Amino acid sequence: MASLLHTWRLSFLLVVALIGKATAAGYSTPVFQASAWQSAFATFYGDETASETMGGACGYGNLFSSGYGTDTAALSTVIFKNGYGCGQCFQLRCANSQWCNKGSPIVTITGTNLCPPNWSQDSNHGGWCNPPRTHFDMAKPAFMKIAQWKGGIVPVSFRSFQGNGYWLLVYVMNVAGGGDIANMWVKGTKTNWISMSHNWGASYQAFATLGGQALSFKLTSYTNHETLIAYNVAPANWQVGMTYSATVNFH
Ligand SMILES: *[C@@H]1O[C@H](CO)[C@@H](O)[C@H](O)[C@H]1NC(C)=O
C-alpha cells in the first residue's frame, strides 16, 4: 500500500533576545537565573487589539509579523537603557493592589518600546515614566493578564533573566497551509531536543544556548499526531529576525 506523503513548506522566523552575556568559552552551559523580584509600577497603553503598540522605539515594526505579539511593554528610560532594554524579557506580576487579578498570575513580556519622560507631568502624578522611576507601560492585553484595567496604574514585581543563552521565539508559518502544530522542539548542533512552549498564535519559545549552532526543529501535528523533523533549518550563523524555510514531509 502506498503511504500518503504530505509535504509542508514551513518558514521559521527567529526572534531572539540575548539573556545575559555569553562567556569567552562560548555557549556551553545553559544557565538561566532570574534576578530577584524588584518593585516597579505598570500602566497600559492602547486597547485590546494592541494596535497602538505596533512600531515603537525598538524598530520592531509590526509586532505580530515580527513575532512578539501583544505581551510587550514600553519601558521607562531607566530600564530602556538607551535601547539595551529592547528585546529584553521580563516577568511581571501585580503586587499588593485591589486591582490585581486573583492568584497573582505572572506574565512574560518583551521590551519593544520606550516610554518617554513627560516633564510637564509630576513624576508621581502622570509622569510615570520620568527618571528615576522604573515603569512598564504595557500593551493592554498583557496588562489585563495581571490586573484589572480599571486600576489604571498598579504596583508590580518584576524580574529579568540572567545567564548564558537566549530567549528564542520562533514564529512558524506553514506556507502550504493545513495542519496545526501541537508540540515543537528545537535542537542546536550541540544540544539535545529542547521542548518549546507555546507563546501565542503560531509562535513557540524556549530558553536555550543556541548561538553559533545550526538549528533543527521537530514538530508534531495536532490533527494527525504525526511527527516531522526539519534538520538544519537555520545555519550556524543564523540571525535575529531572519526567516528560514524548510520543506518537510509528514508520512
Ligand atoms: C505631557 O503631559 C501634558 C500634560 O498632561 C500633556 O498635555 C501632553 O500631551 C503630554 N505630552 C506627551 C508627549 O504625551
Image: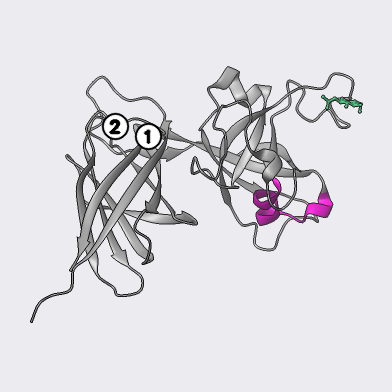
- Tell me: 89 left or right of 117: left
- Tell me: 174 left or right of 134: left
Instruction: Indicate the secondary structure of the residue bearing disc 2.
Output: loop
Give me the residue at 67% from left, 22% from top. Answer: 77
From where the camera sits, is residue 48 visible? yes
The N terminus: image quadrant: bottom left
Give me the residue at 73% from left, 54% from top. Answer: 147
- Tell me: 84 left or right of 7: right
Q: Main secondary structure of the magenta part?
A: helix
From where the camera sits, is residue 37 visible? no
Q: Nearer the viewer, residue 79 or 171?
A: 171
Whether 47 is among the magenta residues is: no
Give me the residue at 79% from left, 55% from top. Answer: 99
Residue that label 2 marks? 238
Q: Disc 1, ligand 1: is the CB inside 8 Å?
A: no
User: Residue 7 placed where, x, y %?
Assistant: 24, 61
Residue that label 1 marks? 242
Pointer 1 with pointer 2, Cβ within 8 A? yes
Name the residue furthest bottom. Answer: 1
Q: Quadrant of residue 14?
A: top left
Q: Disc 2, ligand 1: is the CB inside 8 Å?
A: no
Q: Quadrant of ligand 1?
A: top right
Range of magenta residues: 139-151
User: Residue 82 placed where, x, y %?
Assistant: 59, 17
What's the residue type where badge 1 is placed?
Met
Q: Quadrant of residue 8?
A: bottom left
What's the residue type where badge 2 is placed?
Trp
What numbered label is drawn on residue 59? none
The C terminus: image quadrant: bottom left
Q: Quadrant of residue 139?
A: top right
Q: How is the image coloured?
A: one colour
